[in-house]
Amino acid sequence: MKLSAALLLSCLIATTMACVSTQDVVEDDAIPTNTPLPKAGVNQRPVVGEKTVLLVATHWLDSKEVDMQKLYADTASEEPGSYSDYLKQSSMGKLTLKWTTISVRIDKPYPQNFSGALRDAEEAALKQGYDQKSYDYFFVLENSVGGGEAYMPGRSLIVRGQYKGHHRGGALHMGT
């Protein structure tokens, strides 16, 4: 089953956040040092529980349409091979995402920088009544040529381009 979820970076981020590889995990092993967290609630490891995601499929003037049914199937559905299924498997059921997926049109070309693109997507989502600050994570997808960017540690990412996945653990890889 081929996936075109365009969420390569979120896959990498989530596997970093949710990587729990053994059955004998100690519940208090999230931060193995005494270093205080710069943003409490954002970068604790491992991330567990139910987290909310606002996924904004964006259509800038210079981007292609996003197939919303396929995007849902590849991300939020519980079908084998979906991103949600991958997280459930890789976290041994300790991390689930509750998705809100919307589509927005932005009547200008894609901005020249990451923060501008996030701002445009956030403003367009607000016009539809969705405040990204009400969610644990803010994912932006654009069907165009490109890669992706994310704040680390952080809660926001942008994926540009068309990505395809394969069955190996639900991992996604770039197929542009």
Image (cartoon, rainbow, N blue to C red):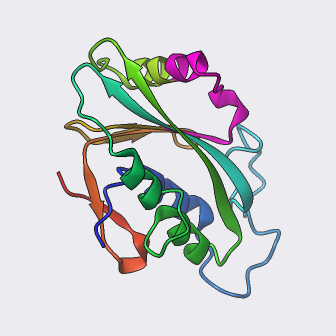
Q: Is-magenta flag for residue 130?
A: yes
The image quarter in which residue 18 lies: bottom right
Q: Position of residue 159 (x, y in %)?
A: 36, 41
Q: Position of residue 74 (x, y in %)?
A: 42, 60
Residue at horizontal 32%, vertical 62%?
A: 3
Residue at horizontal 71%, vertical 38%?
A: 38
Residue at horizontal 25%, vertical 48%?
A: 162
Of 69 and 30, which appears nearest the observer? 69
Position of residue 127 relative to residue 93, above or below, is: above
Position of residue 23 relative to residue 119, above or below, is: below
The image quarter in which residue 73 lies: bottom left
Q: Is residue 159 left or right of residue 56?
A: left
Q: Position of residue 41 (x, y in %)?
A: 76, 44
Q: Position of residue 152 (x, y in %)?
A: 52, 42
Residue extent of the magenta highlight? 122-139
Task: Specify the farthest residue to the front.
Answer: 69
Q: Is residue 31 visible in the rendered structure shown here?
A: no
Q: Is residue 165 left or right of residue 91?
A: left
Task: Specify the farthest residue to the top.
Answer: 108
Q: Is residue 164 left or right of residue 127?
A: left
Q: Is-magenta flag for residue 170?
A: no
